[in-house]
Image: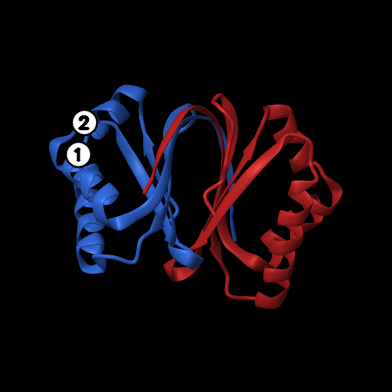
Chain colours: A blue, B red
């Protein structure tokens, strides 16, 4: 559930969105398909996703390079999903592309 | 709910954690206190937080600079909260410090 990622540096795409409440079945199906698809993309390292109150969704995906992120953004099925996202699933979203400079953690 | 942030570059702290299920009232109270406290810190830009299935929590906070992040990490009440996090609230967490290079979004 917490992504296992290599030593920094690597890249993160922070996707923060408000679910519209519409087309819930298609939204869930599309989200699952995109996770499966992302795993097949070169440079994909992992992802984390959580849904909060008021339809807030935070999904962070991790990538080896900016080029890998660009290729993912342009993948044809992903482009179709992005379009459905704007048409139906989301009332708003923000995407932030960030370079992870360091990481540390804790495990009980 | 989606943080309003300035033009990139700025910094993100991606905190991904598994809630232990223990001390739920203290956990909620501490989380709220830390949000209030973060807002008083120099260079704080905003935050987003969502809780998913299986106790997964993703909280992303945004900061003007790495120095602002370092000062937040060392803030005394925050240090006490981090200690309680490891003792009681979380079974695991990962913290990633990242530089946001670009951002874009959509609003219906």
Q: Are marks 1 and 2 on the same chain?
A: yes
Q: Is residue A106 left or right of residue A56?
A: right
| Residue at which label 1 appears | A79
Q: Is residue B89 visible?
A: yes
Residue drawn at (56%, 24%), measured in percent from left and top?
Answer: B9
Residue B100, position as x, y percentages in the image? 52, 29
Residue extending farthest to the front is: B108
Given contact means CB atoms under 8 Å apart, are the residues at marks 1 and 2 in contact? yes
Residue B25, position as x, y percentages in the image? 70, 77
Q: Is residue A31 left or right of residue B25?
A: left
Q: Which quadrant holds residue A79? A: top left
Give residue A74's mark: 2
Q: Earlier in the sequence, mark 1 or mark 2?
A: 2
Q: Quadrant of the C terminus of chain A?
A: bottom right
Q: Label 1 marks which chain's residue?
A: A
Answer few, some or many: residues within 10 Å of disc 1's Cα (few below 14, many 20 plus, some between 14 and 19). Answer: few
Q: Which quadrant holds residue B68? A: top right
Q: Which quadrant holds residue B33? A: bottom right
Residue extending farthest to the right is: B76
Q: Quadrant of the N terminus of chain A?
A: bottom left
Residue drawn at (35%, 44%), measured in percent from left and top?
Answer: A46
| Whole-number angstrom distance, CA of label 1 to CA of label 2 | 6 Å
Pick whichever, B13 or B88, lies toward us: B13
Answer few, some or many: residues within 10 Å of disc 2's Cα (few below 14, many 20 plus, some between 14 and 19). Answer: few
Residue drawn at (28%, 31%), measured in percent from left and top?
Answer: A43
Residue A18, position as x, y percentages in the image? 42, 56
Q: Is residue A5 visible?
A: no
Q: Secondary structure at mark 1?
A: helix
Q: Is residue A104 left or right of residue A70?
A: right
Q: Secondary structure at mark 2?
A: loop
Pick whichever, B11 or B40, lies toward us: B40
Q: Label 2 marks which chain's residue?
A: A
């Amino acid at each position: 559930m917490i992504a296992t990622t290599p030593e920094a540096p690597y890249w993160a795409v922070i996707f923060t969105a408000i679910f519209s409440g519409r087309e819930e079945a298609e939204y869930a199906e599309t989200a699952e398909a995109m996770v499966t698809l992302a795993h097949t993309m070169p440079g994909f390292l992992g992802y984390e996703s959580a849904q909060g109150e008021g339809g807030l969704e935070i999904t962070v995906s991790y990538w080896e390079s900016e080029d890998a992120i660009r290729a993912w953004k342009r993948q044809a099925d992903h482009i179709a999903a992005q379009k459905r996202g704007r048409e139906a699933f989301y009332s708003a979203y923000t995407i932030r592309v960030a370079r992870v400079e360091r990481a540390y953690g804790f495990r009980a």
